[in-house]
Every structure is written in structure tokens, then in C-alpha cells.
């Protein structure tokens, strides 16, 4: 990782970009940046007058960082440039984010006509702790198949929308504030993002949902908007909870209606703070069927002096922690079980609950002084390995902890191992589990640490954890260590019950079943709408590119290519470019990609060897293949390197490569799986068809 420093007042674009010799413009820093580079901005305004060239295109794996602690106050990126976006033609944009890019701690303003602050088209970047203000259209525009993480930002005084979602956009919009904007969030087409824990107030309307959009809304506060809190039109169908999964949104004092719908679909709303007198349209308010008692998990628990947990689903866990002196209530005798838990509060609990070896180096966090009340707890929890800081040296004690962070923390801090990758198949929202956390979630599941309420198979990894949930997880971690008595709760995910939720009905007994199952359970591959996988069908080149993009999330190593038969309007344009720029695939001499052509087995092997940079093979390894003379000369080096690294899978005859035959979906799944094993991202499978060096 490298850091390039930029200072618009004293920098020089001929300088090295070091802290003592900063660059003047972000544009020059982007020219020098490579994947893994952080561009650190000083206070000042970055605009055309300071030499910037817009739009600023932030490539894969590159971060722009200002000051996350104050959401970019005083670090202003202001400007606009014309840029072509597939489907949307030429737009006025300040910043374009490519896959894996990060924008943190800056203020973004695009004052140009119909100007957009940040555009995200079919990529998955992170946008966190920024301020989007006075953009002439919207702060962020998500198009195509964009899947961004947009968290902890402030959207204020933008002319049209805080965020616009179109196409098949998904991703997560968490803990943001939307104020004094036309629509806080505008969701169109078939977009289906998760909108959770945001505050949306003093806009014209809070959220407009149109087209066939299917967003999921949880625990938002939508209030004091001058028209509606939420407006649904066309065929929109927002997920506002159901009887088993209350949504928890709060609607207050919106001038016309809290929820108004002219959609052709019937909207179900459950578990929201929403009155029938404040809604209009085909909307059904459904009572939550979640047991208000102990959920059938425990007899009524003595809740001591805590006045607000009797009958709560987590009462037994909470009292188990209270009895051990690990947590306590508030002075008003409440516990506030459904309130979020901050990072410092979590550190205080684990510092009390566990006494692991403090083998980690003590860090001096920039925002934690020695006289801060949580200093000792943070230090101990950090040194035990339960919790760490951020790349900028901060700890952010008041930031809420998410569920996945808690689970990863407990597994890491206690140094737990074990579990089957297929266990992830139990979770219906497994695709939301970050790739860095999959092994820890598998282990936590195996150790019975995971507690999910009210739906045991819904992990909700990116949601803020509540005080009750944290109590339950930490208690279960104590049980796993033999330091607490087991509690009988139906919300504990039981390891014996955790079996793959595989619904692919045509792979049972297939030679590649194990490879396919594990990739499917991790959300890397999918089947067809009829419930089949069609393992013996061929796979075309564009579908293979999509699989590569999903499996490896590759970063760019070379510029994009202009393939004559893959225009920007083509559905696979983004994945083809992503796989090409990462070095996994190439085109043909006539500048075509031939997306609908069947992928050959030798092409798959060459692709994986190239994309992963495999080496070490000896030409003698070609003797493993009875048909070695059929291997093209240009592919022989790739074949021996892939063989050396156990990537090649041959069925039914391990000694026959069949290089020039069309690869089947099963064969490609098996070889991609082996590539993930080689990269250390997944556990190995014992198959007789893997060619071993």
C-alpha cells in the first residue's frame, strides 16, 4: 500500500506526492495511483481553478481520504466534467467510482446544470463519511448493476435527490442523513437496495419508489418532509416488513402522508411506527407475529431491576450477562435492549468478559485520549485481538458496531477455527456477507455463537447490532469457551441443523456436486429459474467473465479495451471489462470478444493461469496428459503452470485434458473453485479428478 499526499495550496504536480512534497491536484494523483493507493487530501478546495480536471475517475482499489471524523468539512471537491455512461449517454459528473474504489471524508459539490456529485455504474465501491451539498441534481447516482456501500454520509441541499437508484442497482445505504432535498432517495426501474438506519427529514418527499423497484427498508426515521414520507408509484413494491420480520421504520409528521401508494402492487407493512390514518392507497398494515413473550425459548426470566426486558426474546442472555457482572442497565433501570451498540461500548464488554493473551501491539488511536473513559477497555480489547482501528489511525468509538463485525471480532479474538463452508447455505441473505468474513461466519455458526432473531436463517450481517443481540452473541461465545451454562433458545443457529440450502435439483450425484454446492452456498454461482444448474451444458465467454468478476472481485492491472462486439449498452460490458482489465481474459486479433462463443477448456485454463499470475510449472508436467499433442503451443506454459498449482480438473479421465472441447458449466465451476483454493479464499475439496502436480 502507498500514500500520495495532495495539497491544493502548497502542492506541485511535479513533486513526488510525499507528505513533505505533496501533489497539487487529485487528477495528477490519480494518474500516479495504482490499486492499493490511498490519496490523502489536505484542507482546501479542489476545483478547476486549482487545476483539477473533471470528472475525477477513481480506479479500482484506490482510495481518496480526507477527514472522516468531520465528514469532509473543509475538504471540498467542486467541479464537473462531461462523461459518457452506458444507457445514460453524456452526463455532468464530478467523480466516477470504479469497482472497489473508496471515497471517504470529503465534501462533494457539482454546481453544473443537472450536475451529479458521484456516479456509480455497475460497480461496487464504498462511499463513507462524506458530505454531499449543493449538487445541481443529486449527490450520488447508482445505475446499471451498481452495488455500492453508502454509509454515514450527509446529503443536504441537493436540488433533485440525495441518492438516485436506477437499473438493477442493489447495495446498501446505511446510517446516512438526507435533509433539504427534493427526494431524499429516488429509487427506479428494478433497483432493490437495502435502505437501513437512515434519517430522512425536511425534504420535499422522503423516498420516491417507482418502476418495478423492490427496495428493502429497515429501521429508518422518515419525518417532517413537506409532502410524503414515502411515495410509491407505477409497479413499485417496497419491502416494509412482514409478520415474521418487522421493519422498524419510524414515520413522523410528514405533511401529506407518511406512506402514499398509487402502485399496482399491494404493499405490506409490518412492524413500523405507522398509523392507518396517515397512509393512502393499497397498503395493508399487518400485525407482527413475533412472540412478544420469550419466543418459546425460556421460562419467564427474573429480570432483576431491569424494567424493559421482561418477555424480551433475549432476556435470558441479558440476565446471564448481568449475573456475571459483564453488563448493566442504565440509571433509570432500563437496559434499552433494542438500541444500537457503539464500538467503545462493545470494547468495554469484551474487555470484561474475556482475558485472552494480549499479544497484539498496543496502538495509539488518534481519537482516543488517555483520559477517555473507554481508553483502558479499548486498549485491552485491541491487544487481545477483538477489535482494531481504521487505516487513518482512528478508532471511532461512537460509531455503531454491525452484526458481522461482532461475529468476526469474537471468532478472531478467541482464535476459533473450524466449520464447513456449506454452512453459509443456511443463511438466506448469505450474499450480503462480506468476503473477508465468510470463514469467521462459518466458524461462528459451527460454534453455536450465531443468534438470529426473529428469523434464524436471516443473518443481516451489515445491520447495526443491538444491545440485546450483542449480549446474546457474547454469551454464546462464553458458552463455546465453557465459561457459561447453555441457554435453550430457538434463535441460536444450531450446527447440526445447518445444512446446505441448495435448491439445484439436477446436481445430486454429479461428479462436480461438491464444487458446485460450495460455490452456490457462497453466492459465487447461481442456477436457473427452474431450479436447475445444467452442469453439463456449455458456458459462453460472457457468462464466464461474469463468473470471474463475482468469484475474484479482481482489480484492474491494465487499461480497458474497446471490443467491437461489446458496446457499452451490452449487458455484459462491465464484467467483460473487469475480467479483461484484471488480466483474466483477452479478445481476438480482430478486436472482437465474441461473447456468445462457447468457452474452450484450454481458454479457461489459460484465463485462470493468467489472472492469478501462476508460475512454477515444468514442461514435463505435459506428460500427465495422454492428449498433450492436442494442446496448442501458445497454451502449453499456462497448462503446466495451472497443473503445478492444482487448477486443472479432468472428468472422467484425469489423464485426458480435451483442451479444444467446449467447457461445461460443471468443469468451469470446478476449476474456478480450485483457483479460489490456490488463492487461499476457500477450503480444499478431495476430488479424484483434480490433476495433482
Image (spheres, rainbow, N blue to C red):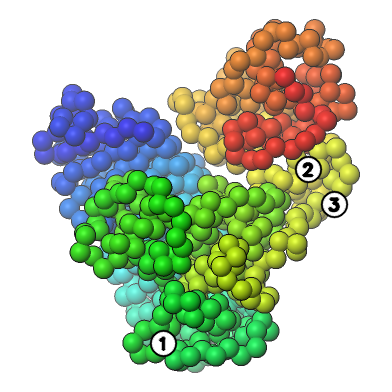
Residue drawn at x 29%, y 70% is 180
Mark 1 neighbour class, 10 Å CA radius: few under 14, some 14 to 19, many 20 or more? some
Q: Name the one closer to the observer, 105 or 355.
A: 355
- Mark in front: 2 vs 1: 1
> Which residue is labeled 3 in the image?
505
Residue in the foreground of this view, choosing between 651 and 297: 297
Image quarter (top left, top right, bottom left or bottom right) of the N terminus: top left
Q: In the figure, 576 relative to 558: above or below?
A: below
* Quarter of the image where one finds residue 494: bottom right
Locate residue 167 relative to residue 661 in the image: left or right.
left
* Dot 3 or dot 1, earlier in sequence: 1
Q: Residue 170, position in %: x, y?
A: 53, 55
In the image, what residue occupies the spot 45% across and 42% down? 100
Q: CA distance from mark 3 to mark 2?
A: 14 Å
Q: Which numbered mark, 3 or 1, is in the foreground of this view?
A: 1
Q: Is residue 662 visible?
A: no
Residue at the extreme left of the image, as rendered: 10
Between discs 3 and 2, the one toward the N terminus: 3
Where residue 108 appears, x then y in whole percent? 27, 51
Can residue 353 be seen at all in this image of the molecule? yes
In space, the residues marked 3 and 1 are separated at their CA atoms by 50 Å
Q: Crowding near pointer 3: few (<14 within 10 Å), some, many (20+)? A: few
The image quadrant of residue 40 is top left
For the residues labelled 3 and 2, say whether their Cβ atoms are less than 8 Å apart: no
Which of the numbered marks, if any, corresponds to residue 514? 2
Amino acid at each position: 500500500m502507498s500514500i500520495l499526499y495532495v495539497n491544493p495550496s502548497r502542492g506541485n504536480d511535479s513533486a513526488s506526492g510525499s507528505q513533505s512534497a505533496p501533489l497539487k491536484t487529485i487528477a495528477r494523483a490519480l494518474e500516479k495511483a495504482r490499486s492499493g493507493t490511498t490519496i490523502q487530501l489536505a484542507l482546501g478546495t479542489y476545483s478547476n481553478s486549482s487545476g483539477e480536471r473533471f470528472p475525477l475517475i477513481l480506479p479500482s482499489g484506490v482510495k481518496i481520504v480526507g477527514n472522516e471524523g468531520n465528514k469532509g468539512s473543509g475538504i471540498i471537491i467542486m467541479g464537473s466534467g462531461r462523461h459518457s455512461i452506458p444507457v445514460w449517454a453524456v452526463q455532468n459528473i464530478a467523480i466516477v467510482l470504479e469497482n472497489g474504489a473508496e471515497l471517504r471524508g470529503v465534501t462533494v459539490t457539482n454546481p453544473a446544470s443537472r450536475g451529479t456529485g458521484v456516479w456509480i455504474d455497475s460497480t461496487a465501491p464504498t462511499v463513507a463519511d462524506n458530505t454531499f451539498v449543493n449538487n445541481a441534481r443529486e449527490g450520488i447516482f447508482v445505475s446499471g448493476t451498481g452495488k455500492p456501500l453508502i454509509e454515514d454520509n450527509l446529503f443536504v441541499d441537493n436540488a433533485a435527490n440525495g441518492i438516485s437508484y436506477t437499473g438493477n442497482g442493489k447495495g446498501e445505504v446505511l446510517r446516512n442523513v438526507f435533509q433539504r432535498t427534493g427526494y431524499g432517495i429516488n429509487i427506479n426501474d428494478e433497483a432493490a437496495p437495502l435502505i437501513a438506519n437512515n434519517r430522512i427529514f425536511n425534504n420535499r418527499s422522503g423516498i420516491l419508489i417507482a418502476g418495478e423497484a423492490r427496495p428493502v427498508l429497515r429501521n429508518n426515521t422518515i419525518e417532517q418532509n413537506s409532502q410524503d414520507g414515502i411515495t410509491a408509484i407505477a409497479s413499485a413494491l417496497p419491502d416494509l416488513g412482514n409478520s415474521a420480520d418487522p421493519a422498524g421504520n419510524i414515520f413522523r409528521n410528514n405533511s401529506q402522508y407518511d406512506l402514499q401508494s398509487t402502485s399496482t402492487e399491494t404493499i405490506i407493512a409490518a412492524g413500523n411506527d405507522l398509523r392507518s390514518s396517515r397512509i393512502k392507497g393499497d397498503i395493508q398494515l399487518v400485525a407482527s407475529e413475533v412472540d412478544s413473550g420469550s419466543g418459546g425459548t425460556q421460562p419467564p426470566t427474573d429480570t432483576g431491576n431491569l424494567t424493559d426486558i421482561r418477555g424480551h426474546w433475549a432476556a435470558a442472555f441479558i440476565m446471564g450477562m448481568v449475573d456475571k457482572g459483564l453488563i448493566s442497565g442504565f440509571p433509570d433501570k432500563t437496559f434499552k435492549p433494542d438500541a444500537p451498540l457503539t464500538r467503545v461500548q462493545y470494547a468495554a464488554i469484551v474487555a470484561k468478559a474475556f482475558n485472552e493473551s494480549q499479544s497484539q501491539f498496543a496502538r495509539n488511536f488518534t481519537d482516543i485520549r488517555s483520559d477517555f473513559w473507554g481508553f483502558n477497555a479499548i486498549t485491552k480489547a485491541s491487544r487481545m485481538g477483538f477489535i482494531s482501528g481504521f487505516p487513518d489511525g482512528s478508532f471511532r468509538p461512537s460509531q455503531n458496531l454491525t452484526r458481522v463485525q461482532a461475529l468476526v471480532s469474537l471468532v478472531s479474538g478467541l482464535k476459533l477455527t473450524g466449520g464447513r463452508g456449506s454452512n453459509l447455505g443456511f443463511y438466506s441473505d448469505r450474499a450480503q456477507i462480506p468476503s473477508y468474513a465468510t470463514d469467521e461466519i462459518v466458524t461462528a455458526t459451527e460454534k453455536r455463537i450465531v443468534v438470529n432473531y426473529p428469523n434464524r436463517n436471516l443473518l443481516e450481517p451489515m445491520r447495526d447490532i443491538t444491545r440485546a443481540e450483542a449480549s446474546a452473541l457474547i454469551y454464546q461465545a462464553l458458552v463455546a469457551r465453557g465459561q457459561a451454562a447453555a441457554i435453550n433458545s430457538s434463535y441460536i443457529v444450531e450446527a447440526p441443523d445447518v445444512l446446505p440450502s441448495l435448491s439445484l435439483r439436477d446436481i445430486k450425484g454429479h461428479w462436480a456436486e461438491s464444487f458446485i454446492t460450495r460455490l452456490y452456498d457462497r453466492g459465487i454461482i447461481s442456477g436457473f429459474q427452474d431450479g436447475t444448474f445444467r452442469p453439463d451444458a456449455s458456458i459462453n465467454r460472457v457468462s464466464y467473465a461474469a463468473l470471474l468478476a463475482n468469484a475474484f472481485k479482481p482489480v484492474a492491472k491494465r487499461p480497458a479495451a474497446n471490443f467491437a462486439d461489446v458496446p457499452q449498452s451490452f449487458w455484459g460490458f462491465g464484467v467483460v471489462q473487469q475480467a479483461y482489465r484484471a488480466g483474466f481474459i483477452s479478445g481476438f486479433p480482430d478486436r472482437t470478444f465474441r461473447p456468445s462463443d462457447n468457452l474452450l477448456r484450454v481458454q479457461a485454463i489459460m484465463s485462470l493461469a493468467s489472472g492469478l499470475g501462476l508460475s512454477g510449472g515444468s514442461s514435463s508436467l505435459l506428460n500427465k496428459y495422454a492428449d498433450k499433442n492436442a494442446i496448442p503451443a501458445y497454451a502449453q506454459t499456462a497448462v503446466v503452470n495451472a497443473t503445478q498449482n492444482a487448477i486443472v480438473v479432468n472428468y472422467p479421465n484425469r489423464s485426458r485434458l480435451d483442451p479444444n472441447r467446449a467447457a461445461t458449466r460443471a468443469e468451469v465451476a470446478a476449476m474456478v473453485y480450485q483457483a479460489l483454493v490456490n488463492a487461499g479464499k476457500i477450503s480444499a475439496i478431495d476430488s479424484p479428478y483434480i490433476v495433482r502436480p
